[in-house]
Image: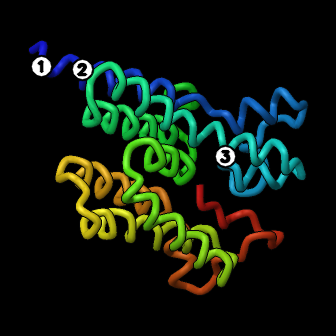
Amino acid sequence: MMDHLPYFLACLGGYLLGSVPFGLVLTRLAGLGDVRAIGSGSIGATNVLRTGRKDLALATVLLDSLKAGLAVWAFASIYDRNVGLVAGAAAFVGHCYPVWLKFVGGKGVATYVGLLVFASLKGFVIGAPVWLGLFALTRISSLSALCAAVAVPIGAFFLGETQFALIVLAGLSGLVFWRHRANITRLMAGTEPRFGSKSGHDDGN
């Protein structure tokens, strides 16, 4: 029983930390109302950017990333890396399904990045260039996020990542695809807009 306690605490602590909707909090504090009422209705940085506040969008990216990173760092410091990975994964789930917002949250890309930076640099050094390269070419953040999500566990495997970490990364990449179901439908139909267009659908985080 005690052997499982660290993982239980990591799941609980990571989830609650990940559930903090920074995009919503920041826009409300700035007097911009509910960010869910505009664009795609997401709480992520891409939708926050549609308010016209680049500073708030950047802050949202950083905070959404750091909540997973903080969860990883805290629990890895207290216990070990595997427990930290579980905490970071729980933060990812919390961002996607926050208890404070009736389990309707963001798509988790920025939170995934934070987990990778703090828990799996092998995954990060593969995923980041894929995202940046594809986004530069296509300007479609959802496509970039989906391709990076595929590349992360595969690339980390070839770089010698541990089995436990690969299982976590594969699971999170699968959840990225699940959260982007609507985007995938539009991509297949050729109707997914590029970043900066007037349509509010292309959210990759």
Residue 160 left/right relative to 15 = left
Q: Looking at numbered disc 2 in the image, what kind of residue is underneath it?
A: Pro
View extreme (top): residue: 2
Neighbour tally class for label 1: few under 14, some 14-19, many 20 plus, Cα within 10 Å: few
- What residue is rendered at 63% in x and 68% in y? 141
Neighbour tally class for label 2: few under 14, some 14-19, many 20 plus, Cα within 10 Å: some
Sequence order check, earlier mark of 1 and 3: 1
Quadrant containing the N terminus is top left
Sequence order check, earlier mark of 3 and 2: 2
- For disc 1, the marked residue is 3
Between 160 and 27, the one lying in front of the other is 160
Q: Looking at numbered disc 1 in the image, what kind of residue is underneath it?
A: Asp
- What residue is rendered at 65% in x and 48% in y? 44
- For disc 2, the marked residue is 6
Q: Looking at numbered disc 3 in the image, what kind of residue is underneath it?
A: Val
Distance from disc 3 to disc 2, alpha carbons, whole Å, reads 28 Å
- For disc 3, the marked residue is 61
Tell me the element at label 2: helix
Residue 113, given in percent of the width and then of the height, sits at: 51, 51
Quadrant of the image occupied by residue 76: top left
Neighbour tally class for label 3: few under 14, some 14-19, many 20 plus, Cα within 10 Å: many
Residue 59, given in percent of the width and then of the height, sits at: 74, 40
- Tell me, yes or no, if residue 16 can be seen here: yes
Callouts 1 and 2 close, C-beta under 8 Å: yes
View extreme (left): residue: 1
Quadrant of the image occupied by residue 26: top right
Callouts 1 and 3 close, C-beta under 8 Å: no
Relative to 62, say whether 150 is above or below. below
Between 194 and 88, the one lying in front of the other is 88
Distance from disc 1 to disc 3, alpha carbons, whole Å, reads 35 Å
Residue 199, given in percent of the width and then of the height, sits at: 77, 69
